[in-house]
Image: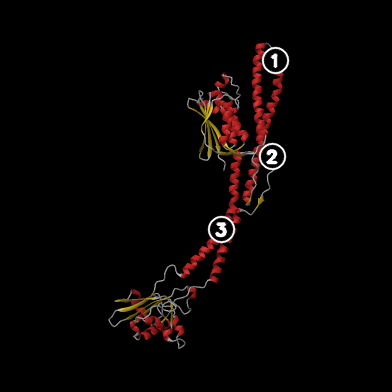
C-alpha cells in the first residue's frame, strides 16, 4: 500500500537566505572592525625634536625618544630631493635646526615626510606656497609644502630647540670640507606595528565569519545532497519510502513533485503486477476444464494436449510465484555478496551440478537477500542446465560488484543475446532438449538486478556463454 507523502517543512527561498547570509557576514565583519578600532589604539606618530636632529648631525646620539633611530651618512653630494631649491631652510623647524647647529640657514637642508590621511591634514594646508607668502608658515614635506606644524608651537610658547617635527625626516648640514652630513629616519620594517594589527584584524574577522558562513551555507545546500541521494535510492529501489526533507521553498516544491512521481510509479507497477497476476490466476480455470475434457479423447491426442496444458500451467505457476515474491515488501539490508554466491553454488553442487568459484573477493552490497539469491540461482541453474557447468568469479570494478557466471555450452548467437531477455523467449536448445524452462528466468533476473541499481548482461565467444551481473557497492 502506498505510503502518504510526508509534509514538507518549508523555509525561506534560497535567494532570500543567500541575501541574509551576505548581509549577516557583512554586518559581522563591520562590527569586528569597529570593535578593534575602538579597543586598539592608533599607531604612534614619529616625533623628532630639533635638538635631537642637530645632535645626530653633530655626531652624537642617533636614537630619539619618540621616533625611529636615525641613520647618519657622509655624502659628497646631496640627493635629488635635498638638492632641490625648495629644500632650503625656510620653516620654523628648519630655522630652529640651523640655530642649534650654529650655522647659516643656507647650509642646512630639511625634509619631512608625514604620511597622514587627508581628513587629518591641518586646515592651513593649501598646496604649494603662494608667491610672496611668509615661508615660516610652510615646510617641505615629500616635495610638497603643507603647513609647518612646528610653527604652531612657536611664538614663545615652545622653545625653538624643542619644536616637534612629525613624520620621517631627512636633514643635512654642509661640513667645512664641502661634503654633507646627512641623517635620515631608519626605514620602517615591514610589516609595521599598525600593519600587523590590520592583519590580525583580518585574520580574526575571517576566523569568526568563515565558520558561521560555512554552517549557514551548508544549512542551505544540505537538502540538495539529500535530494540527490533520494533520487539515486529511487533508481535502486522503487519501493523506497517517500522523501522527507526540510529546507528552502524551492527544494520543497521539488520534493513534493518527486514524491508524487514516486507514488505514481509505484501505483503503475502495482497495477500492472496485479493485472498480470489476475490474468494468470484466471487462466487456471479454462486449463482445468481442458484437462477434464481431454480425459475422453483418444490417447495420442490426449497426451499431446495435456503436455501443452502442463507447460502452460508451469508458465502460469512461475508468473504467480514471481508476482507473489515481488508483491511482498522486504526490507533491504547490507549483504556479504560472496557469502550469498557461495550458498547458491553449494546448493547447485549438492544437486549434482559442476559449479566452482574461481575468483572470490569479499564485497558488501545493499539489497533484498531473497531477490538476489533467486537471481544468482537462476543464472547458475541455466549454466548447469544448458552449459554443463558453471565457473563463478566475484570481483570489484570501480564502485560496482561484478559476478561473472561462465558455462561450457555452445554459447549464443549475436541475435539471441538480447532476445533471451524477452519474456517467454526460449532458445532452440531449451526447446529441443526439453529442459523445462518457460523463458522467464533471465527477464526476472535482469528486472531484479535493475531494481537494485545494477544490470545483467550476456556475452558469448563460441566456447560458452558468460552472464555478468553488476551491483552497486554499499555506501
Residue 56 in view:
yes
> Can you give x and y, in whole percent of width and height, for residue 366 in the image?
59, 39
How far is the residue under mark 1 from the one under mark 3? 83 Å
Could you tell me if the residues under marks 2 and 3 are in contact, i.e. CB atoms within 8 Å? no
Residue reaching furthest to the left = 177
Name the residue tied to disc 3.
Answer: 211
Determine which of the numbered discs, if any, sits on residue 294 in the image: 1
Q: Residue at x 56, y 37 (%)?
A: 471
Vertical position of residue 317 compared to residue 292: above or below:
below
> Can you give x and y, in whole percent of width and height, for residue 300 in the image?
65, 11
Q: Residues within 10 Å of mark 1 (few under 14, many from 20)?
A: some
Residue reaching furthest to the bottom = 156
Circle nearer the viewer, 2 or 3: 3
Q: Earlier in the sequence, mark 2 or mark 1?
A: 2
Q: Residues within 10 Å of mark 3 (few under 14, many from 20)?
A: few
Q: Earlier in the sequence, mark 1 or mark 3?
A: 3
Q: Quadrant of residue 138?
A: bottom left
Vertical position of residue 80 compared to residue 335: above or below:
below
Could you tell me if the residues under marks 1 and 3 are in contact, i.e. CB atoms within 8 Å? no
How far is the residue under mark 2 from the one under mark 3? 42 Å
Amino acid at each position: 500500500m502506498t505510503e502518504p507523502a510526508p509534509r514538507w517543512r518549508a523555509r525561506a527561498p534560497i535567494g532570500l537566505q543567500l541575501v541574509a547570509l551576505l548581509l549577516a557576514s557583512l554586518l559581522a565583519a563591520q562590527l569586528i572592525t569597529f570593535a578593534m578600532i575602538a579597543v586598539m589604539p592608533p599607531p604612534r606618530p614619529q616625533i623628532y625634536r630639533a635638538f635631537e636632529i642637530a645632535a645626530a648631525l653633530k655626531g652624537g646620539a642617533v636614537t630619539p625618544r619618540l621616533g625611529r633611530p636615525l641613520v647618519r651618512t657622509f655624502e659628497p653630494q646631496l640627493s635629488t630631493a635635498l638638492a632641490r631649491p625648495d629644500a632650503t631652510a625656510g620653516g620654523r623647524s628648519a630655522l630652529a635646526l640651523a640655530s642649534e647647529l650654529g650655522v647659516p640657514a643656507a647650509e642646512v637642508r630639511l625634509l619631512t615626510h608625514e604620511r597622514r590621511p587627508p581628513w587629518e591634514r591641518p586646515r592651513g594646508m593649501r598646496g604649494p606656497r603662494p608667491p610672496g607668502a611668509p615661508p615660516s608658515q610652510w615646510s617641505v614635506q615629500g616635495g610638497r609644502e603643507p603647513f609647518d606644524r612646528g610653527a604652531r608651537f612657536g611664538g614663545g610658547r615652545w622653545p625653538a630647540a624643542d619644536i616637534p617635527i612629525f613624520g620621517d625626516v631627512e636633514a643635512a648640514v654642509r661640513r667645512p670640507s664641502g661634503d654633507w652630513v646627512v641623517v635620515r629616519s631608519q626605514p620602517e620594517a615591514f610589516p609595521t606595528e599598525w600593519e600587523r594589527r590590520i592583519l590580525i584584524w583580518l585574520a580574526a574577522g575571517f576566523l569568526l565569519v568563515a565558520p558561521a558562513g560555512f554552517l549557514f551555507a551548508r544549512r542551505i545546500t544540505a537538502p540538495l545532497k539529500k535530494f540527490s541521494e533520494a533520487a539515486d535510492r529511487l533508481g535502486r529501489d522503487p519501493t523506497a519510502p517517500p522523501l522527507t526533507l526540510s529546507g528552502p521553498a524551492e527544494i520543497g516544491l521539488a520534493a513534493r513533485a518527486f514524491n508524487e512521481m514516486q507514488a505514481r510509479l509505484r501505483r503503475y507497477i502495482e497495477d500492472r503486477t496485479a493485472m498480470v497476476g489476475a490474468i494468470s490466476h484466471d487462466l487456471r480455470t479454462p486449463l482445468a476444464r481442458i484437462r477434464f475434457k481431454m480425459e475422453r479423447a483418444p490417447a495420442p491426442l490426449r497426451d499431446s494436449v495435456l503436455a501443452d496444458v502442463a507447460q502452460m500451467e508451469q508458465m502460469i505457476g512461475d508468473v504467480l510465484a514471481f508476482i507473489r515474491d515481488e508483491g511482498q515488501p522486504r526490507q533491504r539490508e547490507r549483504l556479504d555478496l560472496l557469502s550469498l554466491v557461495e550458498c547458491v553454488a553449494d546448493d547447485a553442487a549438492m544437486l549434482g551440478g559442476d559449479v566452482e568459484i574461481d575468483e572470490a573477493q569479499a564485497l558488501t552490497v545493499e539489497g533484498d537477500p531473497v531477490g538476489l539469491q533467486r537471481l544468482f540461482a537462476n543464472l547458475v541453474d541455466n549454466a548447469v542446465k544448458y552449459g554443463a557447468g558453471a565457473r563463478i568469479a566475484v570481483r570489484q570494478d570501480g564502485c560496482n560488484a561484478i559476478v561473472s557466471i561462465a558455462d561450457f555450452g555452445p554459447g549464443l548467437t549475436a541475435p539471441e543475446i538480447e532476445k533471451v531477455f524477452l519474456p517467454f523467449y526460449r532458445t532452440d536448445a531449451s526447446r529441443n532438449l526439453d529442459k523445462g524452462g518457460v523463458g522467464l528466468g533471465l527477464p526476472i533476473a535482469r528486472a531484479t538486478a535493475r531494481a537494485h541499481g545494477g544490470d545483467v548482461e550476456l556475452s558469448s565467444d563460441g566456447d560458452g556463454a558468460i552472464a555478468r551481473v553488476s551491483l552497486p557497492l554499499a555506501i
